[in-house]
Image (cartoon, helix red, strand yellow):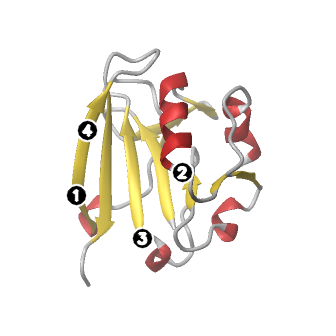
Amino acid sequence: MILIYCVDNQGGILFNHRRQSQDRLLRARILEKTAHSRLWMSPYSAKQFQQETGPQVSVSEHCLEETAPGEYCFLETPDLPEDLGRIQQVILYRWNRDYPADVFCPLDFTRFQRTAEEEFAGSSHKTITEEIYIPCEP
């Protein structure tokens, strides 16, 4: 499974039970990146994709459990798969801003190796950074 998170400078993902931010061009990039696979997400996350949806999008309250190897799961909550060994890759999008946060990305990135990094302009964010991580060898 390939996890996708969006975080602020401190690793925050939520504040007061709501996402910190969203970006139209980021959603388009995620849909483009996942076009040849399945993209799982919760009903909460699906609300922000209503205008830019794709045929690969599957919505489920249990998206983490339903994501198969090679498929993507877009997460806006601190949930993780029970078996961390299922994580094949993590795509982290950094807002490069300081937002209020009370919920943070739950991944321990010392267990992952960054393999790529790219900056791009969003619709509401001057710069968004995409970082690709793979699990470190045991």
**Kind of residue at disc 4:** Glu
**Kind of residue at disc 1:** Thr
The residue shown at (45%, 25%) is 100
- The CA span between labels 3 and 1 is 13 Å
Q: Nearer the viewer, mark 2 or mark 4?
A: 2
Residue linked to disc 1: 115
First in sequence: mark 1 vs mark 2: 2
Query: Dots 3 and 4: beta carbons under 8 Å?
Result: no
Instruction: Give how far across and how far down residue 42 sits, in percent.
Output: 71, 49
In the picture shown, does residue 75 fall above or below 2?
Answer: above
Instruction: Give how far across and how far down residue 125 sits, in percent.
Output: 39, 18
Left/right of residue 76 with respect to residue 131 in the rendered view: right
- The CA span between labels 4 and 1 is 11 Å
Residue linked to disc 4: 118
State the residue in front, 93 or 54: 54
SS of the residue under disc 2: loop
Query: Dots 4 and 1: beta carbons under 8 Å?
Result: no
- The CA span between labels 2 and 3 is 15 Å
Which numbered marker is on residue 4? none
- The CA span between labels 1 and 2 is 18 Å
Which numbered marker is on residue 34? 2
Q: Residue furthest front?
A: 36
Residue linked to disc 3: 88
Residue 112 appearing in the image: yes
Instruction: Give how far across and how far down residue 128 sits, in percent.
Output: 34, 29
Residue 24 falls in image quadrant? top right
SS of the residue under disc 3: loop
- The CA span between labels 2 and 4 is 17 Å
State the residue in front, 129 or 80: 129
Mark 2 neighbour density, 10 Å: few (under 14) some (14–19) many (20 or more): some
Identify the image quadrant of the C terminus.
bottom left
